[in-house]
Amino acid sequence: MTRQRQAILEALKELPSHPTAEEVYNLVKKRLPRISLGTVYRNLDALVADGVVRKIDTAGAQRKFDTKQEPHYHVRCIRCGAVDDVSVKQTPSFEDMVLNRNGYEIRGFLLEFTGLCSECLKASEE
Amino acid sequence: MTRQRQAILEALKELPSHPTAEEVYNLVKKRLPRISLGTVYRNLDALVADGVVRKIDTAGAQRKFDTKQEPHYHVRCIRCGAVDDVSVKQTPSFEDMVLNRNGYEIRGFLLEFTGLCSECLKASEE
DNA sequence: CTTTATGCAAAGCGTTTGCATACTT
DNA sequence: AAGTATGCAAACGCTTTGCATAAAG
């Protein structure tokens, strides 16, 4: 647990939500001006391996990270790429839903809602 | 509708399933040896805009394409990146499931199953 | 003849990696 | 002293773009 890793963890907790590695980097740089992007990526991966941080590989967009909590789902704005949480009435169990699994052993699923965030919604109405 | 675009469409129909732009390129090159990857990307985008082809931005993996059919879902092998179809018992309507939508206007969702394909399953048992 | 698409190569973006240096224990 | 993590910069893989040439309408 180096100085850098600690600062990265703190940054993750302070940042609004679902920051990219670059956003983490920019915040950490204020305290450790000589830190490099590579170190941020390496430590984020290590924290993911430790189970402390979750990696969100959003389809077609820049990868995002967050500190791990209970399972929850995300909305991604199709216009600006913002990601926020969505709460769901019941945690879905899609294992039950699959009919033909094509020889695969299904281990999980990625559920990501898409839409327009409030700001882009406003902008598109003007 | 150029020679190239036609060849790309044909390639898409002949290829097994969910090819990447590069796989399309490799097949088309057999008929039009001077075609370039850039042209393949440009035409795939055009075909997507026409609604003829679907673009599958799989999280963290190489983008894939397929000729558009009825709605269906995909499994992605977490080991080799293969993508195949999965059929689902009922088409889920997640609009109903969302509780707190955080100001977003939800337009859709991306549901992608993850797991191991039969080959990687075999390989991991050895 | 005007417009649009092409091939090529270079640039772009986000991420990863090799390597010498600097910590850590 | 041995091992790990760092900063830096270069490399990477996939995708996009600028531009001069060629094809299409």
Image (spheres, coloured by chain):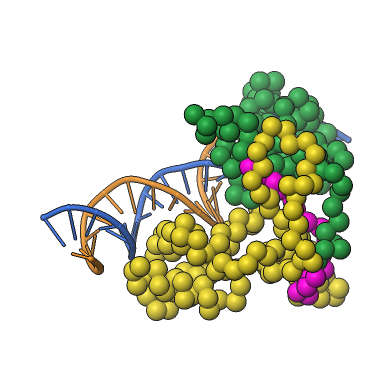
Chain colours: A yellow, B green, C orange, D blue
Q: Residue at x 61, y 38 (%)?
A: B116
**Residue C20: percent from left, percent from top:** 21, 54
For the residue pair A28 and B34, the one nearer the viewer reads as: A28
Which residue is pictured at 74% across the width and 61% down the height? A91
Is A63 within the magenta?
no
- For residue B108: magenta? yes
Any part of residue A41 in sight:
no
Query: Between residues D18 and B108, which one lies in front from this camera angle?
Result: B108
Identify which residue, B26 or B75, lies in the foreground.
B75
Q: Give the extent of the magenta segment.
A: B99-115
Magenta stretch: helix, strand or loop mostly: strand
Q: Quadrant of the N terminus of chain A?
A: bottom left
In the picture, measured across the screen, residue C7 lies left or right of residue A42, that is right
| Quarter of the rendering containing residue B3 | top right
Quadrant of the image for the C terminus of chain A?
bottom right
Is residue A106 positioned above or below A2 on the image?
above
